[in-house]
Image (cartoon, rainbow, N blue to C red):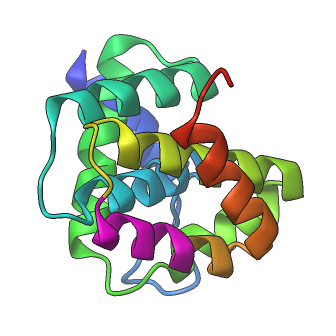
Amino acid sequence: MIDSIQRFFNDMMAAGDRPDEPAISLELATAALLVEVVLADYHLDDSELALLRELLQRRFDLKDTALEELIRLAREEAETAVDHYRFVSLVKEHFDYDQRCELVRMMWSLSLADGEKHHLEEHRIRRLAELLHVSHGDFIRAKLAEEAPGE
């Protein structure tokens, strides 16, 4: 079963512009950006991991095994990536502005899942929002919406 999931993700990751660097799927790019936020404070909390699973499952409608494989690959990509260019450019190419704003909102949600505001997570989200061309106003609106849900 794991082999078939790995083949699925490998098929989605056909050769990219550079022969030594495989292309990545939109799902993997999105997950890698979210993992970047989760790992920004150098601590992966169980509540952050649970919310990451929930957000990715809801966004991409993946089965448990495929979801776990996506998270594993995203962690690998986030931990070994030199920069965010591959992830951000793919997301910008396929997500419209509202979807990119929603991604920033998801980042805020993940950063606050452990009940702590960490300056490294905020810095990472700010930088990613800029790279995704999300306005500062929408960046702040997403932050406020996640800090005070239901109000």
Nearer to me, 96 or 116: 116
Q: Quadrant of residue 72?
A: top left
User: In the rendered view, would you say 126 is above or below 78?
Assistant: below
Where residue 109 appears, as percent x and y from the top left, is: 48, 40
Residue shown at 64% from the left, 80% from the top: 131
Part of the protein shown in magenta: 118-127
Where residue 143 appears, as percent x and y from the top left, is: 60, 52
Residue shown at 67% from the left, 50% from the top: 142
Residue shown at 65% from the left, 20% from the top: 150
Where residue 58 appears, as percent x and y from the top left, is: 57, 20
Tell me if residue 147 can be seen: yes
The quadrant of the picture occupied by the N terminus is top left
Nearer to me, 84 or 17: 84
Where residue 118 appears, as percent x and y from the top left, is: 28, 62
* Most common SS among magenta residues: helix
Q: Is residue 129 left or right of residue 125?
A: right
User: In the rendered view, would you say 25 is above or below 20?
Assistant: above
Residue shown at 69% from the left, 72% from the top: 132
Nearer to me, 151 or 31: 151
Q: Quadrant of residue 96?
A: bottom right
Q: Quadrant of residue 134?
A: bottom right
